[in-house]
Amino acid sequence: MSDWTEKYRPRTLDGVLGNPSAVNTMRNWAKSWEKGIPDKRALVLIGSPGVGKTTSALALAEEMGWDVVEMNASDHRTEGEIERIALRGSVFNTFDRDGNYSSASEGKRKLIILDEADNFFGRTDYGAYPAVGRLIKNTKQPVILIVNDFYELKRRSDAAKNDTLQITFKKTSAASMTKALRRIAESEGIIADQDALDIIASDAAGDMRAAVRNLESLSLGTDRITSEMAAELSGRDTRKDMYALMYSIFRKSDPSEARRVYSEIDSEPSDTELWIDDNMPYEYADKGDLVRGYEALCRADIFLGRVHRRQYYRFWAYAGDIMTMGVAVARMSPGHSYERIRFPSFLSKMSKSKAVRSIRGSLVSKISVAYHTSTNRASSDILPYMKILASGDPEFRLSIAGSLGLEPAELAFLLDSKIDSAPVRAVFKELSETEEKRRLASQIPRRSAVLPEVPDKASAMPSVPEKSAAAEKPSAPKQKGQKSLFDFRGGCYGSGLQGSSDKTAVPHIQGSRRGQAVPLDEGEHASREALLQTGFLRHQKPQMPADDSRSERMQPYVLLLLEDPGT
């Protein structure tokens, strides 16, 4: 059995419920593409979940005969993926779903859809916002961005704010949803009571997708849906919001109703206090009502303060009763205000600055770790000067972005610019190219040094014929100017000793004979591996007395000449 939300998804814009104005605007925008590329190349569909944004975008493509290239939150939406799929698809011609060549010059179009374009997550969707900005500005195909929170998108991308056409979708009315649910039930052979459909539609609160899924869940195993069945499902999901509480406090005459709604909302008492405080001056025009209302609110605040100091949460009950019923009975003048309920300004400001404060905190943490200092010191003494240096010095911002591992949002905060600004893009493009060069370099196999074959132990020490003392020539004295075996021009590596076949490059062994032991001087052990690769030296650990307390590393070694230096 297929999902009913997909099975009954509208195929044309005429089937979309509740937003005729938005649908007409979308249709007019789509028709403007028949005349060429319009001024606004991208649409932004704004609205809460389940109001028909994605359905409208797909229905538009079906109605216009466009192919669809879609990316949603389940896809990897990094900068590279967006450029590979969406940006290239929006610029170049392609093939349609039937395999036929689609040429933009002949009027063939494809619709690029970015669903949940306001939800890009850190490293998972690295570089997504700059790529979206380039897509909006450079696309040669129609683009639709679908968002729940347009503020989050326009805060990060100037192109989304200035170069797009924004359309807001409203929640579908309960009456329209009930009619649609009736048609679906009849198509499935389900007998549904009218009261049951009304309850399902009311409980969905404008979310058509949720309503259809509730109807489908109630129909499992039965061919009849009653109001009792719908009421059980509704009771599980029903929650009141803060706007309903403000309405019951300020615009109804039943204080107990206000207390009941307060018990059904999911909110902290301190948040409720902020809502009442912001709305009371607009709701109570009479000065006496305003004084009495604020006296009740102040008394509730005293109880909340005692909860904070003493951790005695029983006082929450007293605070809730006073700030709801106490404020409600404070109004004695007739009538009430007809202005809209306001969202608390304090919460609004904190919400808007939350992302900025989070970015600043992350940046300060990275600075404090890198410079071994506290976050307070990094915030007050380092960050201000770092912002000045980053703004005026491109090399500094490149260095600091690489060394601290900054995210694009953190670098944009340093530069006081948008995340898709040219300086931010330039830095991370150069960092990406550098990282790619390092990756390619690491894949190149290095030439391994071929060590000469060393004779086995039995043949390692060639036989040395015995000679008389008179016939033995004295070895050449060590040059006075040479301090050690490695004290020659350029050092072992600089003189070409490693792998060299020129045995005269080692003055220390001149005059020595094959098989003669040449002791290592102090400090020369660290470089003996270089001597071993010359092909004519071999080291051997001499026999040490049993009571020698020196460690193995400090015990002396000798170098044995495998060949005469002059040969």
Image (cartoon, rainbow, N blue to C red):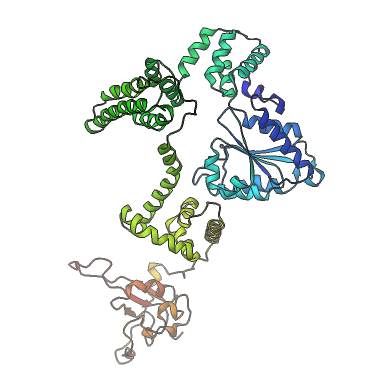
x then y, percent, for residue 410: 46, 52
Can you name the residue that lies furthest to the left here?
547
x then y, percent, for residue 516: 34, 80
* Pick the front one: 459 or 117: 117
Can you name the residue that lies furthest to the bottom here?
470
Residue at image position (40%, 33%) is: 278
Position of 189 compared to 449: left or right? Answer: right
Residue at image position (65%, 29%) is: 55
* Pick the front one: 248 or 23: 248
x then y, percent, for residue 522: 28, 77
Q: Give the quarter of the image for residue 433.
A: bottom right
Q: Can residue 351 be seen by looking at this rendering?
A: yes
Question: Does residue 345 sit above or below 563 in this rendering?
Answer: above
x then y, percent, for residue 533: 44, 73
* Pick the front one: 413 or 5: 413
Q: Can residue 220 be seen by looking at this rendering?
A: no
Question: Does residue 312 sit above or below 90 in this rendering?
Answer: above
Position of 162 compared to 249: left or right? Answer: right
Residue at image position (68%, 32%) is: 58
Question: Does residue 152 sit above or below 134 in this rendering?
Answer: above
